[in-house]
Amino acid sequence: VGPEAGADDRGDERIRRRNARSHRAILDTTTELLAEVGYGQLTIEGVAARAGVGKATVYRWWASKGALVIEAMSQQPTVPFDTDTGNLRADLLAAVRRMIDVLTDSPEGTVLPELTADLVRDPRLADQFRAQFLRPRRSAIEKVIQKAVERGELSPDVDIRLVLDASAGAVFYRYVVTGEPVTEDLATKLVSLLLDGTGSTREPPQPAAGQVRP
Amino acid sequence: VGPEAGADDRGDERIRRRNARSHRAILDTTTELLAEVGYGQLTIEGVAARAGVGKATVYRWWASKGALVIEAMSQQPTVPFDTDTGNLRADLLAAVRRMIDVLTDSPEGTVLPELTADLVRDPRLADQFRAQFLRPRRSAIEKVIQKAVERGELSPDVDIRLVLDASAGAVFYRYVVTGEPVTEDLATKLVSLLLDGTGSTREPPQPAAGQVRP
Amino acid sequence: VGPEAGADDRGDERIRRRNARSHRAILDTTTELLAEVGYGQLTIEGVAARAGVGKATVYRWWASKGALVIEAMSQQPTVPFDTDTGNLRADLLAAVRRMIDVLTDSPEGTVLPELTADLVRDPRLADQFRAQFLRPRRSAIEKVIQKAVERGELSPDVDIRLVLDASAGAVFYRYVVTGEPVTEDLATKLVSLLLDGTGSTREPPQPAAGQVRP
Amino acid sequence: VGPEAGADDRGDERIRRRNARSHRAILDTTTELLAEVGYGQLTIEGVAARAGVGKATVYRWWASKGALVIEAMSQQPTVPFDTDTGNLRADLLAAVRRMIDVLTDSPEGTVLPELTADLVRDPRLADQFRAQFLRPRRSAIEKVIQKAVERGELSPDVDIRLVLDASAGAVFYRYVVTGEPVTEDLATKLVSLLLDGTGSTREPPQPAAGQVRP
DNA sequence: GAGTAAACGAGACGGTACGTCGAGTCTTTTC
DNA sequence: GAAAAGACTCGACGTACCGTCTCGTTTACTC
């Protein structure tokens, strides 16, 4: 038994003998039902019934609907983010486009805003979400942006995560809060804004004709 | 809600006047319970009971929990946004700070992320939310930024709403999705990012020397 | 509104407006299911489903399965006990025979022993059982025996209820505890025993002569 | 159970010897839990857990909760019934008193009425109960009464078992069905009734005078 | 003494029913 | 003649045990 197997076994010991078939059936059914009825209409009762499993079996392994959904979503194959063109602007644009696609087209997109309601209520669930779902997906993009820093295209002073939060945040906020259209055009303008700024000077225009203090 | 919009509203008003007491009690109770138990734990049953009103009375006037909450929140006095310093950077910074305060400190802040789950499920509710709650609060800020354009501090080409979406979105996204700290520091860096950009050139650095300086 | 109606209304007020149709359906279904599956297999869930009623409706009006069953049984028409022959021995015999019939032939008979398990656990349920089911049925027999006292056939010193407890008890105990046959023969011998005793003297027999007084 | 009955039991014994510890622990735990929570609240799951035994081990040796309880109760030392005064009345009185004590004071007393519910549902269980628990206890009393016959105090025609059923039945029935007090007084009156009867004549009184005295 | 088969503890499993909660609708009573 | 009060049907909740079924692990008996 090699060292890696030893480590694995220790982990398995904590998770005491879960039935692989049931476990798979539950996660698969969850994914199915998420696509069919959405997060809000998904019930643990429904998952158990469709998966041919007792409710208690679901509750034994997952603390809540949210925990179950996060695990199911995490196991969906990530659309690989390998758009590494060697050009920051192009890469960031690709990243924003992907966010838009995921949010507006994929099952995950519709689930995410509903799921966040549970995240703010339950910090442990939020932790699970970030560790299991968000982090893996996000680090792929972070790495690509990081290369731009290494290439010298971006100052090392720039907070990459802030840029990503502003990108994703703008898209997400439009989609769920303001309801303004989330289009191709948004992607272009957003990348411009973040890379180039609004083009305002650091100080108000010269006092020559200034509205404020003379 | 702004000036009433015609015959329909007049009808509503006539009817509503009859049961003003119940109507007020329901909205007030909703505000109370929102603060006490949050959106998720708030139930129409609970509101009706505490307000001393039958459930049917609540359903007569509001289609859903969301509609009730939106109206209750809308009636809360808006913290007036009058930070009009005549300096774009300062004004935008004040706006971002306010968003942070509202989201992290006020009852509305905790309600909003939970409410959005319902908004994506119910477009009519989303419309109500935007018309009744979001628009009034947002337009105050928009006007202040607009003045910066008039002052010449900001190019008329800049999409003000996009800037606001990116500001609010970054804060919101951090708070509900990534869980990274939403602090004073975030406000400053975010405003810098949006006004000044990342400072990258439009093209990758000249191929002359390698990407990584020797 | 006559006096009796007044009294009734006051009672009805305590029981606030229960839906007559549901109420009847629940009791009727209970009676049906008792006969079909017995007390042990009867579930409130099953009653609600068959009666086309929500579980909560059942729980609103009855505190437990036992309470429901007692009320259902109480509403079954009592086989009238009017065997008033004017002869104590014949009347008591008829009474015992009826007990045997009820216990071994009727649905109530099979229910009773199972129900008693709940009675010993729940004194309030026991009270309900006695007031609603036992008392009405028992008092009919008591009255007939009482007439024998008035007729002079039975000493006023005899504790009628004890006689009845011994009659019913012997039958019941045989049926549920000892399992010895509960037959026609039992009825005759039991009545003899209770009316005539074992024929033993109050003192042990005189050593000299026979057991029975000369 | 009396002398072992052949090959089967020998096999059982051989097997049982292997796990005498578990076997004992299960029975002892059952006795404990019976006293603590009663028959109704006793669960096989609870017994297994407290006995430090797998559920399957319990099910391997006992077919049901009832079977387990009966065996546990049977192994409790019987309060020896040796009140053989040589006087029928005194002996029967002692027997009835003991029934009352057992029913109202001992753990067995509270268990019995709940157990009977299962006996009527399951004839095999009833057989086990009678062979293992009832018969040994009852035969002690029967023997004492039998001596009264031999002594000449009681006619050989008297059905001893019927007398005992009426005694035990009256007590049992009062306790679980009618709920009337089960007291010392009951014992005396009951013995009088059974030995002496009600003192009624075999025929109704002469028609000379009316039934009701003038 | 080693090998082997059973019985073992542990507890996961598919189920059934529990009793509760709230949703949204419908009915009766009251002002 | 509307609105209070709240009963209604419905569906899901999360829990408790049922009795069955793997899992490794003793353990006691062959060989």
Image (cartoon, coloured by chain):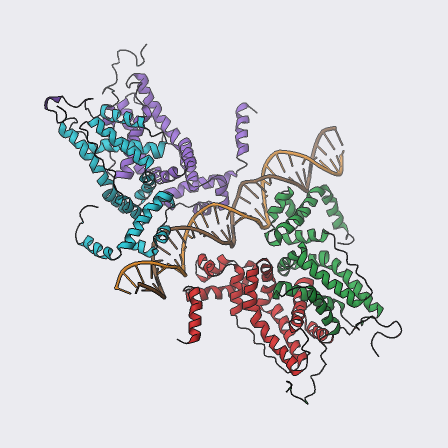
Chain colours: A purple, B cyan, C red, D green, E brown, F orange
Quadrant of the rendering where the C terminus of chain C is positioned:
bottom right
Towards the viewer: B5 or B91:
B91
- What residue occupies the far top of the structure in this picture? B214
- What residue occupies the far left of the structure in this picture? A209
| Side of D131 relative to B101 (left or right) | right
Up-down: is C194 above or below D176?
below
Q: x, y (%) of residue B180?
A: 36, 29
- What residue occupies the far right of the structure in this picture? C208
Which residue is at 18% across, 35% downward?
Answer: B143
Quadrant of the rendering where the N terminus of chain C is positioned:
bottom left
- What residue occupies the far front of the structure in this picture? D214
Q: From this viewpoint, is residue B212 visible?
A: yes
Q: x, y (%) of residue A102?
A: 32, 35
Which residue is at 30% across, 49% downward?
Answer: B27
Q: From this viewpoint, is residue A53 visible?
A: no
Q: x, y (%) of residue D96?
A: 72, 64
Which residue is at 65% across, 85% downward?
Answer: D213
Towards the viewer: C99 or C36:
C99
| Side of A6 relative to B13 (left or right) | right
Q: x, y (%) of residue C154?
A: 68, 79
